[in-house]
Image: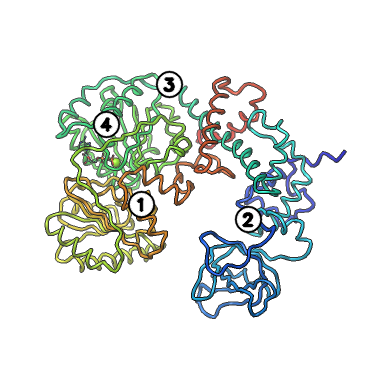
């Protein structure tokens, strides 16, 4: 019999084959025990069973090549971005052998690792300039000696995420060791029953060092299923937890009806259905925890306001929180206009009241019934004595953690979160799996069309003439440019350069400037001047991204548009097409690459937020899209929210089944899951 192997819980500082000075580096990666090493799954694999010949021209996919370094050294140019170049040659290095130049900029340590005559494996995207082929910033590894054959060569090799002092090569060696010396049967799974499966141990090995890609794929499936199960359990348990929270039933609808009767237009069917969903939640003895999703301009604000009136009529306060001060102020203006005739007291709170008393605009008497503000409102419980409803506008700026804290408040308000970010169905279950969802799938009628076009920067003068023509006809325009400078000083400078440029281009039409570094009063003044039509064009950063509503503005020009994500561009585009005029969105890429063309082309083809989101997911993968929405969930090590959609659904069903039978997870086989969930929720629900 072979020895059973080491306890997976053994701390890495007790392991003889790990140099003690590397233990802190490992800890930084979250690797403390042998089990952690085994569960540090690779980012990708390289097929080093045989290397493909050097290509003649760049292929579409990244390439993996192995060659001998024939020349290496620092480049004479590049300034502070000092470059290092290593040329690798295929085969015998004869006059006919092909070469690739690998270059790294601003990475001084690279030079210390490379010397001529060494063999190097490089991975990256090949580029051509003239006859020369380049790999810029390739991932690389030096092949050291024949001992490498066992772990680093002649097989499918894992590449793990490293860190300071931890090269992929080193991690590969340690993980190889760990797999061969640890009792893998004792690395338990949260999925009840999974530990007993004999192929689980093989999967733990094969996920790192597979013998074939088929074996890798089946190992991956098995472990991804476990990973998704853990994640979905967390979501299902949070949802179950919220479902048990008592709410304060609120009925009544007179105020709301009076609001609707005073509107110059009827509500859309989708708005009415959303309001019905919300009223049903609010009338029940359970706490509402609902997401309202609707494309930009679909009219979510009125739905929220209707809900607020139900809470107010029942004798509670309502609060509406927006991600930016600008949007909070705009909501405040809308709400006072609509609610003052109904005798409702509305107050605005932005920033911290303690910091800036002057922002307290409401001066009426008595306690405010509706409080509008930024997310900072959350931390000012003194304002909210008796909250019946809290509305979070544009929730994509608001993480799962903050949401969890809200819904578990001791004073038990209903919670309505609103977002214009359409999340494809495959992701919705993860991003919003703990919420009930209402979708507004209908736009108010009589909206002008939006025509989107991608135009080369060379066409700027023509674009300016087009803008001038519309401004002269009385319309207004937004001109958006992305922030490129990190320092405040440079940023403000870049803003003023843009501003001067456009002022000249559009003269004599008046231009305004709006950017994040301006003082609140200045921003306010710039926005007011634009709303009032005193300025015809607003040169702005993405501060205008959310919620701003000026129906007379029908042109949006975005410079360096490729620097923005698709979702963000779609949000920005939502600023136009709000009135009856035909609107124009002009996208100018700074760098005209095929990727930029493809991305921006999506917006030329569709105005539908869902279609944009699907394309975004296809082009970019889900990582960025979930962004903050995913915080509060454990990071995925293996699973791919896009590719593995079917497995997510399966995991969801498995998790739901377990909670259905055993909601407190009291059974012994559920103990590991119960303990793990308790650990995860400490952070989300404790604070
Ligand atoms: P969003 O869903 O992006 O928050 P808003 O609530 O800001 O959209 O609504 C956009 C514009 O549409 C506002 O000017 C609003 O007054 C108007 N609006 C809302 N509902 C309707 C409707 N049923 N018919 C016509 N216009 C509407
Ligand atoms: Mg809105």
Residue name at image x 49 percent, y 43 percent: 642
Q: CA distance from mark 4 to mark 1?
A: 28 Å
List the residue tagged with mark 3: 246
Disc 3 packing (10 Å; few <14; some 14–19; many ≥20): some
Mark closest to the chain's N terminus, 4 or 2? 2
Residue ranking furthest to the left: 473
Res. 385 image quadrant = top left
Q: CA distance from mark 2 to mark 3?
A: 46 Å
Check contact, mark 4 vs mark 2: CB within 8 A.
no
List the residue tagged with mark 2: 162
Q: CA distance from mark 1 to mark 2?
A: 36 Å
Residue 360, relative to residue 169: is it above or below?
above
Secondary structure beneath label 3: loop
Front-most of residues 141 and 659: 141
Residue 32 placement (x, y as % from top left): 68, 46
Q: CA distance from mark 3 to mark 4?
A: 27 Å
Q: Is residue 392 visible?
A: yes
List the residue tagged with mark 4: 271
Residue 615 placement (x, y as % from top left): 40, 48
Q: CA distance from mark 4 to mark 2?
A: 50 Å
Residue 359 placement (x, y as % from top left): 27, 46
Number of the front mark, 4 or 2: 4
Front-most of residues 437 and 344: 437
Which image quadrant: the N terminus?
top right
Check contact, mark 2 vs mark 3: CB within 8 A.
no
Secondary structure beneath label 4: helix
Mark closest to the chain's N terminus, 3 or 4? 3
Mark closest to the chain's N terminus, 1 or 3? 3
Residue 602: mark? 1
> Is 250 situated left or right of 84 in this image?
left
């Amino acid at each position: 019999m072979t020895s059973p192997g080491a306890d997976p819980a053994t701390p890495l500082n007790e392991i003889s084959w790990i140099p003690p000075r590397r233990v802190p580096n490992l800890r930084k990666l979250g690797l403390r025990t042998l089990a952690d090493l085994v569960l540090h799954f690779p980012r990708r694999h390289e097929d080093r069973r045989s290397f493909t010949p050097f290509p003649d021209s760049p292929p579409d996919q990244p390439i993996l090549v192995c060659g001998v370094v024939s020349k290496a050294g620092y480049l004479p140019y590049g300034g502070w971005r000092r470059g290092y170049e290593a040329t690798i040659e295929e085969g015998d290095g004869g006059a006919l052998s092909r070469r690739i130049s690998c270059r790294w900029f601003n990475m001084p340590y690279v030079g210390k690792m490379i010397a001529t005559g060494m063999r190097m494996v490089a991975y990256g995207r090949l580029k051509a300039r003239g006859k020369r082929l380049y790999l810029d910033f390739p991932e690389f590894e030096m092949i050291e000696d024949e001992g490498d054959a066992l772990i680093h060569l002649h097989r499918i090799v894992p590449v793990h995420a490293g860190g300071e002092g931890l090269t992929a090569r080193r991690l590969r060696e340690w993980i190889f060791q760990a797999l061969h010396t640890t009792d893998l049967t004792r690395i338990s799974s949260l999925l009840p029953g999974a530990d007993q499966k004999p192929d689980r141990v093989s999967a733990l090995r094969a996920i790192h060092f597979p013998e074939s890609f088929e074996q890798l794929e089946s190992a991956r499936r098995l472990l991804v299923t476990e990973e998704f199960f853990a994640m979905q359990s967390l979501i299902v348990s949070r949802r179950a937890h919220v479902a048990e929270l008592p709410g304060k039933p609120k009925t009544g609808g007179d105020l709301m009806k009076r609001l609707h009767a005073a509107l110059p237009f009827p509500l859309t069917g989708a708005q009415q259905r959303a309001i019905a969903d919300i009223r049903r939640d609010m009338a029940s003895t359970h706490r509402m925890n609902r997401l309202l999703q609707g494309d930009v301009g679909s009219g979510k604000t009125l739905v929220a306001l209707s809900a607020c009136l139900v809470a107010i009529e029942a004798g509670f306060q309502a609060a509406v929180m927006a991600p930016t001060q600008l949007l909070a102020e705009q909501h405040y203006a809308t709400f006072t206009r609509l609610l003052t005739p109904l005798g409702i007291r509305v107050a605005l709170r932005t920033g911290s009241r303690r910091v800036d008393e002057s922002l307290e605009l409401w001066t009426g008497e008595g306690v405010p019934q509706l409080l509008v503000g930024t997310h900072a409102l959350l931390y000012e419980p003194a304002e909210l004595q008796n909250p019946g409803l809290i509305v979070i506008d544009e929730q994509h700026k608001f993480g799962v953690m903050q949401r969890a804290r809200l819904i578990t408040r001791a004073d038990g308000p209903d919670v309505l979160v609103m977002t214009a970010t359409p999340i494809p169905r495959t992701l919705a279950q993860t991003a919003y799996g703990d919420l009930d969802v209402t979708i507004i799938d209908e736009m108010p009628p009589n909206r002008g069309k939006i025509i989107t076009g991608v135009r080369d920067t060379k066409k700027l003068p023509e674009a300016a003439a087009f803008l001038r023509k519309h401004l002269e006809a009385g319309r207004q325009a937004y001109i958006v440019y992305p922030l490129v400078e990190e320092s405040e000083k440079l940023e403000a400078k870049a803003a003023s350069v843009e501003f001067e440029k456009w002022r000249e281009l559009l003269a004599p039409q008046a231009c305004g400037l709006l950017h994040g570094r301006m003082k609140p009063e200045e921003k306010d003044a710039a926005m007011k001047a634009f709303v009032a039509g005193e300025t015809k064009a607003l040169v702005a950063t993405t501060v205008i991204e959310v919620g701003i509503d000026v129906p007379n503005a029908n042109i949006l020009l975005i410079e360096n548009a490729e620097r923005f994500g698709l979702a963000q561009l779609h949000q920005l585009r939502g600023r136009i097409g709000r009135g009856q005029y035909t609107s124009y969105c002009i996208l100018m890429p700074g760098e005209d690459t095929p990727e930029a063309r493809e991305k921006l082309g999506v917006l030329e083809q569709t105005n539908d937020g869902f279609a944009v989101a699907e394309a975004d997911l296809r082009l970019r993968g889900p990582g960025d899209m979930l962004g903050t929405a995913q915080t509060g969930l454990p990071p995925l090590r293996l699973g791919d929210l896009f590719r593995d959609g079917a497995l997510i659904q399966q995991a969801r069903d498995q998790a739901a089944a377990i909670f259905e039978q055993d909601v407190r997870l009291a059974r012994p086989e559920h103990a590991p899951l119960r303990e793990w969930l308790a650990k995860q929720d400490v952070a989300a629900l404790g604070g």
